[in-house]
Each structure stands twice: as structure tokens, then as C-alpha cells.
Amino acid sequence: MPKKSKSVDIRPYSRLVVDGVKQTPSRAMLRAVGFVDGDFDKPQVGIASTWSNLTPCNMHINELARLAADGAEAAGAKAITFNTITVSDGISMGTPGMRYSLVSREVIADSIETVVGAQGFDGVVAIGGCDKNMPGCMMALARLDRPAVFVYGGTIRPGADQRDIVSVFEAVGGYAMGTVSEQTLKFVERTAIPGPGSCSGMYTANTMASAIEALGMSLPNSSAQDAISGQKRDDCARAGAAVVNLIKRGITPRKILTRRAFENAITVAIALGGSTNAVLHLMAIASSANVKLTLDDFTRVGKRVPVLADLRPSGRYAMSELVAIGGIQPLMKTLLDARLLHGDCLTVTGATLAENLRDVAPYAEGQQIVRPLSAPIKKDSHLVILYGNLAPDGAVAKITGKEGLRFQGKARVFNSEEASLKGILDGKVRAGDVVVIRYEGPKGGPGMREMLSPTGAIMGKGLGNDVALITDGRFSGGSHGFVVGHLSPEAALGGPIALVETGDIITIDAERREITVNLSAAELKRRRKSWVAPKPYARRGALAKYARQVSSASLGAVTDLEQIDHAKKRP
């Protein structure tokens, strides 16, 4: 006779909180928030909501959280909703406040872990809608390893004339150049962002949503739905039910978040022409899942994966237009059929990726958004990992091929984002320059600010094809042009980028995967002797704690790397 399958305890955590005489006080507290007798026998599902009205990305998530809770309760669980923070990159961009952006990823991960761990939830639905709360949610789910589903809040619809937030940043540069009038600038400001949802191109939010779907941690097509749509509402309700199914089957995130799943995520991010932030965030999520993922994995996978989607910022189309032709599922089916995805990876549906994609139809004939494999935009990855005497531990470039594959020019050095933006707008940056923005790394910033304001200004001033930009900071998914970020070691630690002087010749070679400054090892050593470390930006508070704990960008800029104790074990 076949062996009986081992029964799954559907309340492994909540029973510790609510069962027995000694937990009577816990039950008394929970009755005050709506529990009745029967609820104490149900698995508890925490709904982690990132709602706030400080950004359009998250302003609608309160309603989505309610729908997810209803879905979980209809499936037999008791749902409890709690909030975590979010900050807006688009609002804080170009200001000191942007230092808190990447920091918020860690705060979000820590806060979700803290609530779920303290309250004893048996499962989690996490709903994110902006750049950092999505990887923050995923890091928490990986750490907790309790049945969980991630839900994307959805993409915004483009504004007037298909404009979006990047249009606004580039209009600022155009205004400085004199090609955009004050009246036009005001019109762009008033019409570019019409309502709820995440930024409309294949910027970081849509990149990470797609990568998370490819990881198997969200329901099929969750990444490709308009924020205000019936499909997104249904997605949330189904996610609530799905997590109850995972609880009953004992499927937890680390059974889904395998190394092969991360290779799938890298593949989809590349095919979509996604943000460089995917490198940073996928390594951070992998770290939380105890999966070894390195910069070199992006190179290895990228050698065989083409860029197929003609999406903004370097392409023509918005995410809502991809949604209209079927989202990313037909693309994933194409990649699976070409053996570029691992179809045996488990997903939150309880089925494998291949099973989820079995009946997916191809894109309709005539669509121009996603190219066939036979005619890619670029035959290999646009996410290019560079090494060299400027980045011994690695750097990340976004090279679609439209910018060219090699750039050589004279360094124009700035010690902060603010100084670089002023220099660009004041005309100090000229064709042939390599703009160097340093002391913006994880520790030095601190917080690794995004350089959308400088890159937007460069584009707006018409220098996009004539100037390169390198930094130990990072880039918004909306940045495009010849840009290289994440240079490691960073300037604040005395990395080579700290030793560059204006006028030095810098070469960026995407084909050779090198980034170098034309200086001898002896000259770099001489300059290092006279280099003085900068004073910390903050001595107390969140930024100071982050700067003390954060790892290199080449390791995902995480704050909880496992500490290896080399001391002798006690008997």
C-alpha cells in the first residue's frame, strides 16, 4: 500500500499565540480587533500593505489589501492587515532625502519580518507598488520562509502625449538648454502622472514585478496589470486564496526561491530590457533566501539571453501597452520553448512554471512591442558587468547597444549628485566627457542615491549620445544613455573611483567588459597615499546605522550578511 502523505500543520505559528489557557490574554486582545471563537481555529494570514498617499505608486494599495484579506478569509483563513512604510524615489530624487530610498528597502524587510515573527502568522500576502518596497517585501518573505504570495500594485497609465515621470526629469534639462519653454515645462508637470500606479516604463518597479513573477512568487501576470483595473482586483483576491492553499500544502518561499528560479528572474529581466537595480535587488533577495548569487551569474546568463522588449526608457512603449497585448506570460512562454527558462521551478500556484505556461497563447500578429527571438533588439544582455582598475569588485552598466559599445573620454569629476547636476545645467559638462559622480555609494552616500536627475539633465540638454556617466551610486530604472553604476569598492572606502581626477582618460568597453582609467598601478598607489576618507554624512539615526552595517553593492548592499564566527567552539 502507498504511504500516506505526511499531514501539514496549517497553524504552526498561530497556535503558539492563541492556543491554551496560558494564551488567554492573547485571545482577549484579539477579540477586541474582531476575532470570534471560530477564528482561533483558523490559520492566520498577515496582509502586509505598503499603502500610503505620499506616492501614486501606493495610493490605491489599501483597497487591494482589503481584497487580498477577503480572498484569504473566503478560503478559510483569518486575515489581519498591517502596514509598513514606503518612500517615493520620484519625489525625493535629486535631494538629500533620496539617501533614505535604498535604506527603506531594509526597513521594510525588517518591519514585515518583525510583525509576522511577533504575531505568529501562518502565511503572508505582501503587496508592493514602488521600487524599494517590492524587494523589501521579498527579502522579508525569504527570511521568514512561511507560505507567502507577493502581489504587485500595478502600473500607472501614461499621461498626456504618453508622458511619464522620466519625461518630467528630461524636460528640466530641456528647459535649462532652452529647448523647452516654461509653459511647456508646467504642462508636462501637470499632466505626466495621471493617477495611481507605478512608473509606466520598464523602470525598476515594473522590472522587479516581472522578476518576482519569474521567480514564481506572484500569480501569473500579476506583474502586467494596470493598477486601476478589474484584473488587478481579481489578482489580489486570488492571492489571498493562493496563500491558504500554500499553507495547506506546506509550500514555503525557500522551496520556490531556488538558484534556478533566480536564473529565470535574471532571464526575464534581461528580455524585458529591465533596470540595473534588478542586479542589486535580486542579489539581496537571494541573500535572504540563502541562495548564492553573484555578479558573474548575470554575465553567465546574459550571454545567451537577448533583449526582446522595446520598452521605455530606451525603447518606445509603456508597460500599459505591454499589458494590452497580454503582459509577460507570452514572452515567458517564448523563452521557455527556447529552453531559456527552467520550467521545473515551483511557483505560488502550487504548480511548476511550465505547467502555468502550458496554455498561454503567443502575442497577436502585428504587435511591435516584443520582438521575436530571431530579430532581437540586442542578441545578449544589456545588463553588463564590468571589471577593471576602476572597479576591481565590479560595476553594472546598462548598454542596450543604442549608446554604442565603447566610450572613451576625459573625466569630469564631482563629489556629489548635487554638484554634478549643477555642473550639467551650468554647461560645465561637454561632449566627450565622462561624468564621474562619487561618494554616493552604500556607505558613502549613504544610501546609494539614484542619478536620474543628472541623466535626465544630460538627455534634456541633448548630450545623451556624447557623454558617459559613471558612479558608485546607482541609477533609476528611468535612466538611459551610456551609464555605469555600482562601482565597487566605493569611493568612501578608498576605491579607485576616489582617486580619479578631472582630465584623466576613462575607457568603458562593453564588449571587453572593462572599465579603466588610464593610470598606472604606481600612480594609483601614489594618489591613494594622499587620499583622506570623508567624514560620515550622519553620526546617529537610520542613515548612520545603515552606513555601519551595509555591504558592498557587489554583494547586494544588504545589512544582514551572515557573520561568520571564527572563534573556537565552546565545549
Image (tube, rainbow, N blue to C red):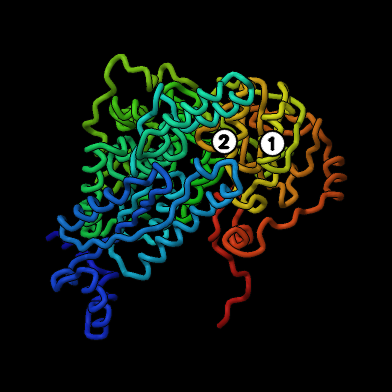
Q: Along the horizontal axis of the image, is 273 left or right of 65?
A: right
Determine the image quadrant of residue 118.
bottom left
Q: Which amino acid does label 1 sit on?
A: Ser
Q: Residue lying furthest left in this view?
A: 1
Q: Which residue occupies 69% across, 33% down?
A: 515
Disc 1: CA contacts within 10 A as few (<14), some (14-19) or many (>=20): many
Q: Which of 301 and 429 is in front in this view?
A: 429
Residue 438 position in % (x across, y down): 70, 42
Q: Residue at x 26, y 59 (%)?
A: 250
Q: Which residue does the image show at 56% across and 20% down from the upper left?
A: 402
Residue under numbered circle 2:
452
Q: Where is residue 364 in the image (x, y as percent from the top left)?
A: 27, 19
Instruction: Tell me the distance, in whole angstroms, between the alpha carbons under discs 1 and 2.
Output: 12 Å
Q: Give the residue pinned by disc 1.
A: 420
Quadrant (top left, top right, bottom left, bottom right) of the N terminus: bottom left
Q: Which quadrant of the figure contains the C terminus?
A: bottom right
**Tag 2 or tag 1, which sits nearer the N-term?**
1
Whole-percent x and y of residue 482? Answer: 61, 27
Label 2 Cα neighbours within 10 Å, binned few <14 / some 14-19 / many ≥20: many
User: Which of 4/160 is in front?
Assistant: 160
Element class at badge 1: helix
Residue at the far top in the pictured view: 366
Question: Above or below — where is 493 with respect to 195?
Answer: below
Residue 108, which numbered label?
none
User: On screen, 40 above or below 390?
Assistant: below
